[in-house]
Amino acid sequence: MKGNLRKKFVGDRNFYKMVLAIAVPIMIQNGITNFVSLLDNIMVGQVGTEQMSGVAIVNQLIFVYNLCIFGGLSGAGIFTAQYFGQKDDEGVRHTFRYKIWMAVILTAGAILLFLVFGESLIQMYLNGSSDGGDLAAALSYGKKYLLVMLLGLPAFMMLQVYASTLRECGETVVPMRAGLIAVAVNLTFNYLLIYGKFGFPKLGVVGAAVATVMSRYVEAAVVLVWTHRHKERNSYIVGLYRTMKVPGALVKKFFIKGMPLLLNETLWASAMAMLTQCYSVRGLNVVAGLNIANTINNVFNVVFIALGDSVAIIVGQLLGGGKMEEARDTDNKMIAFSVFCCTIVAAVMLVIAPAFPRLYNTTPEARTLAARFIIVQAIFMPQNAFLHAAYFTLRSGGKTLVTFFFDSVFIWCVSVPIAYFLSRYTDLYVVYILALVQVGDWIKCAIGFILVKKGVWMQNIVTNEN
């Protein structure tokens, strides 16, 4: 029995080399991005609670846009991985063009939405108690930060189009290197512009936004220039812009597969924003504490996020090559590896939970809440690792409608109602509310286990395309 379990869930050295070759660069790049956000957050947090809270609220809203882009590109990305597995450059070019059109539409819509309704959206999070700071000041800082951050959305858009395609075609190192360069730019100008060092103006939260926007453009430029200069390695880039037309039949195919992903990511991100809004009715200290906890949590989450992305890439390519049983075996081992890694990461989070909030210039109550939020997030990290890997397993085989119900429909029908009811109609401690929302995901774990085990995701979606 033990031998069979080991054979099913544990790979050999070559297996883990293959997985880590894909996952580690993604992990490093995402880790760099989140580490920069962490340092950015700490620097702003040194200025004051209102500044930190205003920035945190805006970042929560922009997070919805980020995931819209992710979801909008992911549908075509499923085909990219399988086209690449079949060495079909023209197919990759079609997905690339479709991604550009989708990203432009989503970005234009997001900029318009934030310009018209930005203040109202920020205000949603500032209707609770003013314990811990001035709500009007937090709103003012948030508005200033948002207006500058909108300038960086076009760069983020193009970066995601190119970087996602590179990853789906197995090139994960270049986006990582671009991220390293972006880190240097962001950190340097954060220091110079937030605090006004070496003759630069002291801009506070606006300086943090300017530094972030600058780093986005630098990162995008590095990825785009490298891709076009290495045509021999990225043969699909040759002739990419000779036309921006995508065959109607493929647009329909990409749209049908991709729309559930776009809706899923949009609804999931908006649900996360709604969960934060539910907690925020308990006061500005809760907003500050959640911001601190989520910042460090995002850094540690890169482990299961990268391993989930690896599932989509590796399993997707195996499915595209018609290697169904190998795909199943690989998927089992990758899910087990993700849960194992995240159990270790969770233990590290538990150790640092009491110390990390002390880096912020905020109220003692906000620091206490932050430490307890981090503990809850650490306890449930292995669970979230399984859910993330299961989601990407289903997505690798094109089961986007299933992932839509599995992810966003579940969070709106189960998680949000739990948080909404408990935060508004009970006096339950907000940390317990956060924990109970995570407990609700036990239902989702059972559903994910059944779907993955049944193999409903094992299909090649490009074989009969022509």
Image: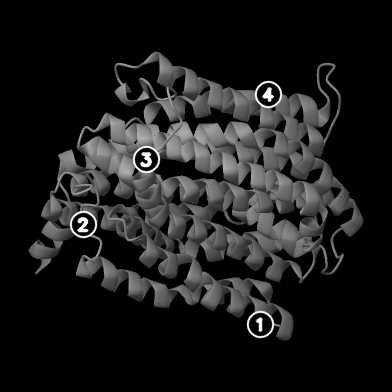
Q: Are marks 2 and 4 in contact (CB under 8 Å)?
A: no
Residue 100 appears left or right of 188? left
Relative height, residue 433 to residue 151 (above, below): below
Residue 1 locus on image (x, y percent):
9, 69
What is the crowding at mark 3: few (fewer than 14 residues within 10 Å), some, or many (at least 20)? few
Residue 307 locus on image (x, y percent):
35, 48
Relative height, residue 249 to residue 369 (above, below): above
The answer to which of marks 2 and 4 sits earlier in the sequence is 4
CA–CA distance in space, label 2 to label 1? 41 Å
Q: Which residue is labeled 3 in the image?
A: 247
Q: Which residue is labeled 4 in the image?
A: 188
Q: Residue at x 72, y 38 (%)?
A: 149
CA–CA distance in space, label 4 to label 1? 44 Å
Q: Which residue is labeled 2 in the image?
A: 459
Q: Residue at x 66, y 34 (%)?
A: 152
Q: Are marks 2 and 3 in contact (CB under 8 Å)?
A: no
Q: Amino acid at mark 4?
A: Thr
Q: Secondary structure at mark 1?
A: helix
In the picture as drawn, the residue positioned furthest to the front comes out as 248
CA–CA distance in space, label 4 to label 3? 45 Å
The answer to which of marks 4 and 3 sits earlier in the sequence is 4
Q: Secondary structure at mark 2?
A: loop
Of labels 4 and 3, the one closer to you = 3
CA–CA distance in space, label 3 to label 1? 48 Å
CA–CA distance in space, label 2 to label 4? 47 Å
What is the crowding at mark 4: few (fewer than 14 residues within 10 Å), some, or many (at least 20)? few
Q: Amino acid at mark 3?
A: Pro
Of labels 2 and 1, the one closer to you = 2
Q: Secondary structure at mark 3?
A: loop
Q: Which residue is labeled 1 in the image?
A: 421
